[in-house]
Image: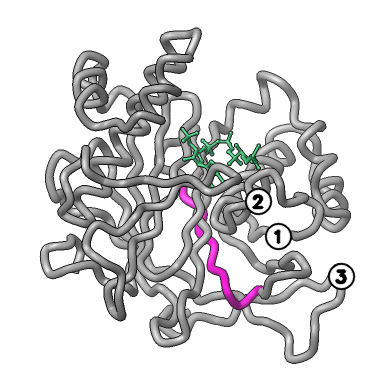
Amino acid sequence: MSGFAAGPDPGSVHLWFCPNEALEEPLAETLAAHWLDEHEHDVARRFMFPRDRRQYLVAHVLVRRVLSLVTGVPEAEAAIWRSSRGRPFLRSAFGEGPGRPVPDFNLSHAHGHNVVAVGHGRRVGVDVERTDRAAERGLEWIVQSYSPEERARLAELPPGRQRDRATLRLWTLKEAYAKARGLGLGLPFDSFAFELADDRGVLRFRPPDDDTADRWTFVELQPRPEVLVSLAVERGAENSGPARRLFVHDGFPWGRSTPRELPLPVPHRSPPAPAGPGRLIRPTPDPRRRP
Ligand SMILES: CC(C)(COP(=O)(O)OP(=O)(O)OC[C@H]1O[C@@H](n2cnc3c(N)ncnc32)[C@H](O)[C@@H]1OP(=O)(O)O)[C@@H](O)C(=O)NCCC(=O)NCCS
């Protein structure tokens, strides 16, 4: 099932990628006027630069459209609350219950690109970055926040494009995980570590001390040549098991368009004994994947 006509599939995660251009400015303004809540209007009023306001409006109109597609609740009626650390959650309009978990969602928006992820009965976290960001500012300041093993592996790469790309891949993965946890930058980025596969994908994940590797799956996407997206997906409740399928939607979701389906890697394996600091866990091979 790729849409929601038969109800949400707890084994699926959906991701919507939408550049600002996919929603013309006057339309974004009109939809925002009708759909956003007090808090969102308040934030939108405070932007000094039209570019930043536009980014915010498209991102939040997108969130409300996606939540409406997922729940069937009209865009303006989705009740969104925010944790003390600012993580938005959907308040159920139809009552939470067994087999009817409130969808979890997460938003990332940067430099003209917007991404919303939605999971059912599991936390999701998402981050989007542009790969040309390195040219603007240099990335050394970011690397200083990484774990020792990540810094050591980056230092082995030749300076320039290859090292910058690995640095940004780590950044988006770290943000996606920290956002799934709801901690954002409040989670020290040196308290957990990723080991990257050459082009895309995570070979190993060392979680922070208060978490286990087997709770998480990570996916990297490149929806445009200059855009990196990382997604963190929680395993979910005991009875729901890991998510199996990822559906990627491109553009503003006016209708139930057919998304692209991608397999999700199985969660990373936890060690039999408590993990010590610096220990990295290999992901379990996915039996569904052909060699
Ligand atoms: C979440 C955070 C990492 C965002 O980083 P970013 O790369 O600048 O922005 P992104 O576009 O990827 O994500 C922004 C979106 O993430 C969501 N978000 C905000 N706080 C979040 C959190 N703690 N966890 C998960 N998602 C969060 C929001 O939807 C936000 O969009 P909005 O501000 O337009 O509503 C960063 O803002 C942060 O660490 N916030 C927490 C701050 C905190 O702890 N505050 C405590 C009270 S002072």
Choose the circle earlier in sequence order: 1 or 2: 2
What residue sits 61% from the left and 47% below the top?
Answer: 175
Mark 1 vs 3: CB contact within 8 A: no
Q: Quadrant of residue 70?
A: bottom left
Give the structural element (helix, strand or loop) at label 3. loop
Relative to 148, is 244 on the left or the right?
A: left
Res. 194 mark:
1
User: Is residue 277 found left or right of 101 in the rendered image?
Assistant: right
C-alpha gap between disc 1 and disc 2: 8 Å
Q: Nearer the viewer, residue 216 or 168?
A: 216
**Other-residue count near label 3 (Cα within 10 Å), few / some / many at <14 / 14–19 / ≥20:** few
Amino acid type at circle 2 is Lys
Amino acid on which disc 3 is placed: Pro
Residue range (magenta): 213-221
Q: Where in the image, quadrant-wise, is ligand 1 located?
A: top right
- Residue 174: assigned label: 2
Q: Distance between the residues labelled 2 and 3?
A: 17 Å
Residue at 16%, 44% in the rendered image: 74
* Tag 1: amino acid: Phe
